[in-house]
Amino acid sequence: MKIFPYVLLAVLCLVGFGTAQTSSSEFEFGKPSDLKGLTKVYVQTMGDLKENERIVTRINKAKVPNLEIVEDIEDAEIVLVFGGSTFHSVVGVSSNTYGNSTNSSVASANLLQGEGKVFVAGRDNDKPKLIMRVQNEQEDKAEKRPVTKFVEEFIKVYKKINGLN
């Protein structure tokens, strides 16, 4: 089965995550039901080993029957692609007045932003199918990381489609 060129092409087209327009000619649009019965998952995090580990760990903790992480994209039936970034944002300003003097301070935070996509790998000469796209942010430390939200959404959809709820 020669799926690698098509999946790799789709992955490379998506590296920009929102900064570059992706042509739908690189992939087809699928639906969550296309995940039914598929079990082999390849994780692509654009070289970010920590995010890769977070995805693999979360999938393993979910103990989804028969769902297997594969190391080679050639073996994949499902490809999870995730990319994220950190940005600095002003979250507030406070002022204190003492007599005739006013002190102001700016509160800022590093926020995480991420986007994950789920593909069903193309088989033979078929193009990969985009099944899901999840974009989100972590606005404070108490909130889940974007990668966690992405993988949890994938697991939820996968379990529902495969009758594992």
Image (cartoon, rainbow, N blue to C red):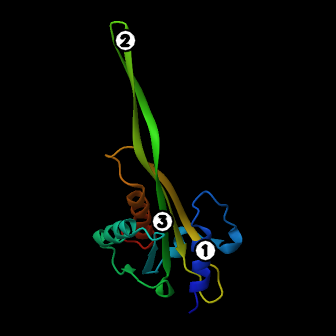
Picture coordinates of residue 116, whole percent (x, y): 49, 63
Q: In this view, does 135 lie above or below 59?
A: above
Picture coordinates of residue 130, whole percent (x, y): 58, 70
Nearest the viewer among 137 and 28 is 137
Q: Gap between marks 3 and 2, in whole Å? A: 49 Å
Picture coordinates of residue 139, whole percent (x, y): 41, 44
Q: Quadrant of the C terminus?
A: bottom left
Residue at 37% over, 68% down: 55
What residue did someone put label 1 on?
A: 10
**Which residue type carries mark 1?**
Ala
Give residue 14's quadrant in the image: bottom right
Residue at 67% over, 74% down: 26
Give residue 156's quadrant in the image: bottom left
Q: Is residue 2 above or below residue 78?
A: below
Q: Gap between marks 3 and 1, in whole Å? A: 13 Å
Asked if labels 2 and 1 touch by Cβ distance under 8 angstroms, the answer is no
| Mark 3 surroundings within 10 Å by alpha-carbon count, few (fewer than 14), some (14 through 19), many (20 or more) | many
**Which residue type carries mark 3?**
Phe
Instruction: Give the structural element (helix, strand or loop) at label 1.
Output: helix
Residue at 33% over, 67% down: 58
What residue did someone put label 3 on?
A: 82
What residue did someone put label 2 on?
A: 101
Picture coordinates of residue 147, whole percent (x, y): 41, 60
**Which residue type carries mark 2?**
Ser
Instruction: Indicate left or right for 8 with 44 as reference.
Output: right
